[in-house]
Image (spheres, helix red, strand yellow):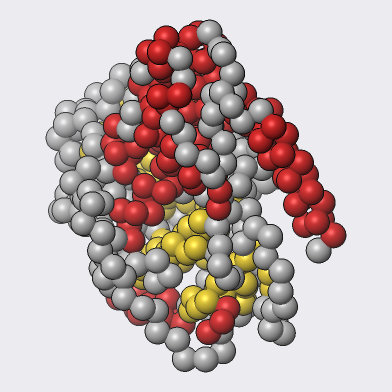
Amino acid sequence: MKHLGMLTIVLALMLSAIARGSQPEQLTPDQARQIAIDAYIYGYPLVTMEYTRRAMTNVESPQGTQAPMGHLVRLREYPTAAFRDVTAPNADTLYTTAWIDVAKEPWVLSLPDAQDRYFLFPMLDGWTNVFQVPGKRTTGTGPQVYAITGPGWKGTLPAGVKEYRSPTALVWLLGRIYCTGTAEDYAAVHALQDRIQLTPLSSYGTPYTAPAGRIDPSISHKTSPREQVNALDTGAYFNELARLMKDNPPAAGDAPILRNMARLGIEPGKAFDISKLDAGVQQALANVPKEGVAKILGHFKQAGKNVNGWTFTTRAGVYGIDYLQRAFVTYIGLGANRPQDAVYPTSETDANGQAYSGEHTYVMHFTKGQMPPAEGFWSLTMYDADYFFVDNPLNRYTVSSRSKFAANPDGSVDVYIQHENPGPGKEANWLPAPKGKFVLMMRLYWPRESAPSIIDGSWSPPEVKKQD
């Protein structure tokens, strides 16, 4: 517990220093604007997490992808082409998720014996950092019990319960269990999901039923959390950020940007009142949300790599003080894993830089021994232009490491990406496309870290070449 004492001292000194200068400075409008844009980007993940939590927990009981705080969501099957709730769904893992608040007491997560099945259970703090990720890669597949404790918690845990300390009160559990999608495997994974338990520490070891949730009618379900966050004006956004930082404290490394934010009156746990600022400063800050979002989206080319027409990043899950990268990943892929757990190359154009269209036929050629290097699994998924599954005669949305490909005489494999069936001899390698535009996404779960590896750049997804 010694390191926790040091962390508490550092944080106390940091906040004390901020408090000494708590009155907003007389800044020029341009100085204030620059500080506010940086603060907007810095706080974007925390505010987005909160709005996402509200949307996903504003129900009385679990239904679909939603459940009250402290309840587990157990998704039982893969989406179909009719599914429109979440963009870029997958047909590789079944989710078991929950939102919890560890401010008052720890929560205990009990995971059953997965019997060597691939799974991972990343735990995200309020700033979207993956602070722990139990699973086959890290902790094996035997039975495991964890107490997720909050900032500053002190106490004793029952025997056999391992502590995972969250840096924030807000925690999002995003469990994924590999499943082939057959009726038999669905049943096996459902049995695992049913044995996963989540209880407050005070109820651990006794029969526990999570209480029903309360619906807040003021929470909108008509617009997405991202749209709601982006619609906040400057004053409302920074007031929300300041409120959230009380129970979701900034990291010690955030001290420099917190000092700047305090110059504007944005401080953890204190109401932000934009009217206290000079009129010229208020005017300069009016467009900060739009400018902040524009800067986040403008980070696209610097956020990752573009190789052979595939765009991907190996900088996700843990961000340090790279606030722009953290905000960008929040914007396009909230809940991203650490690269050691998953990398998601995405392609919107072929080898010639032309947008994909079902009017053409394409081939993705894997040289012998150069299939995607993943210790967990890999998949190649077809999406329409809006990142949803594509209806097709085979109900096939992906090809993957579980596919039984027909290899070429030299041992290589060609994946046929097109709208029309390529024929009986090639159907096993066919990824059906829509008639119009489409997008491809690969998933490498537990990517190999030694060569060949997508993490160190010694392996890259091959080009997708137009054939006609």
Q: Position of residue 201 (x, y in %)?
A: 58, 78
The answer to whether any part of residue 418 appears in the image is no
Q: Is residue 169 visible?
A: yes
| Residue 415, horizontal then vertical, whole percent | 36, 42
Q: Quadrant of the N terminus?
A: bottom right
Q: Is residue 22 above or below residue 455?
A: above
Position of residue 61 relative to residue 36, above or below, is below
Q: Nearer the viewer, residue 442 or 18?
A: 18
Q: Quadrant of residue 442?
A: top left
Residue at 47% across / 64% down in the picture?
100
Side (left or right) of 32 relative to 423: right
Residue at 65% across, 58% down: 151
Judging depth in this view, the residue of 350 and 113 nearest the camera is: 113
Q: Residue at x 50, y 63 (%)?
A: 101
Examine the rendered structure and indicate whether residue 253 appears above or below residue 62: above
Q: Position of residue 119 (x, y in %)?
A: 52, 65
